[in-house]
C-alpha cells in the first residue's frame, strides 16, 4: 500500500497550481493548521466532496487486559472521526479501469 506524503502533496500543488514550491508548502501547512485548530476546539471540518472530520467524546468505561484478564478503567477522552462523503466512497469503490478525471 502506498502512502501519500506531505512532500508529495506539496509537489502536486506546485505542479497543478503554479505556485513556487515554497508557496505550495506554505499553502498546505496553512490549510492543515486551520483544520487542526478547528478540531482542537471541538469544531467539525466539512470539506465538500471529500468528507467531514469531527471530534467525539468517549465516556469512561471498563476495559480488560487481554493477557491477565484484569479489569482496567479507561478514562474519558476525545477521539478524531472521519466520515467520507458519498462522492469519495463512490470514487474509492469505482472500478480501477475508470480513473477519476484530472481537473484542468
Image: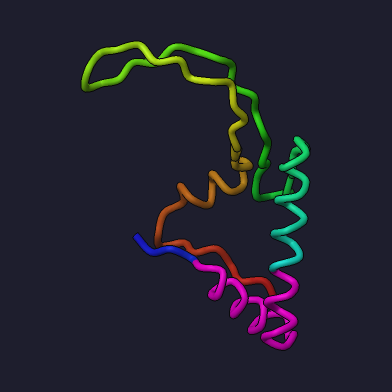
Q: Position of residue 6 (x, y in %)?
A: 56, 69
Q: Nearer the viewer, residue 16 or 79?
A: 79
Q: Nearer the viewer, residue 31 or 74?
A: 74
Image quarter (top left, top right, bottom left or bottom right) of the N terminus: bottom left
Position of residue 81 in the picture relative to residue 3 (left or right): right
What residue sits 75% from the left and 35% below the top?
A: 42
State how the image is colored.
rainbow
Where are the magenta residues, as a range? 5-28
Position of residue 63 in the picture relative to residue 29 (left or right): left
Q: Does the magenta segment cover residue 20?
A: yes
Q: Position of residue 7 (x, y in %)?
A: 55, 75
Q: Position of residue 62 (x, y in %)?
A: 44, 12
Q: Is residue 29 above or below residue 65?
A: below
Which quadrant holds residue 82?
A: top right
**Residue that protrudes farthest toward the left in the picture:** 67
What residue sits 59% from the left and 33% below the top?
A: 79
Q: Does the magenta segment cover residue 27?
A: yes
Q: Position of residue 100 (x, y in %)?
A: 55, 63
Q: Nearer the viewer, residue 28 or 98?
A: 28
What residue sits 76% from the left and 49% below the top?
A: 37
Q: Report the magenta stretch's main SS.
A: helix
Position of residue 31 in the picture relative to residue 72 (left or right): right
Count the labels in the image: 0
Q: Is residue 29 above or below residue 85?
A: below
What residue sits 26% from the left and 21% below the top?
A: 66
Q: Is residue 101 above or below residue 45?
A: below
Image quarter (top left, top right, bottom left or bottom right) of the C terminus: bottom right
Amino acid at each position: 500500500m502506498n502512502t501519500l506524503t506531505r512532500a508529495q502533496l506539496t509537489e502536486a500543488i506546485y505542479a497543478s497550481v503554479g505556485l513556487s514550491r515554497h508557496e505550495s508548502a506554505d499553502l498546505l501547512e496553512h490549510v492543515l493548521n486551520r483544520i487542526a485548530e478547528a478540531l482542537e476546539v471541538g469544531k467539525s471540518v466539512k470539506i465538500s466532496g471529500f468528507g467531514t472530520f469531527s471530534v467525539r467524546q468517549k465516556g469512561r468505561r471498563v476495559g480488560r487486559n487481554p493477557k491477565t484478564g484484569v479489569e482496567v478503567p479507561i478514562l474519558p477522552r476525545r477521539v478524531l472521526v472521519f466520515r467520507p462523503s458519498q462522492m469519495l466512497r463512490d470514487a474509492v469503490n469505482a472500478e480501477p479501469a475508470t480513473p477519476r478525471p484530472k481537473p484542468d
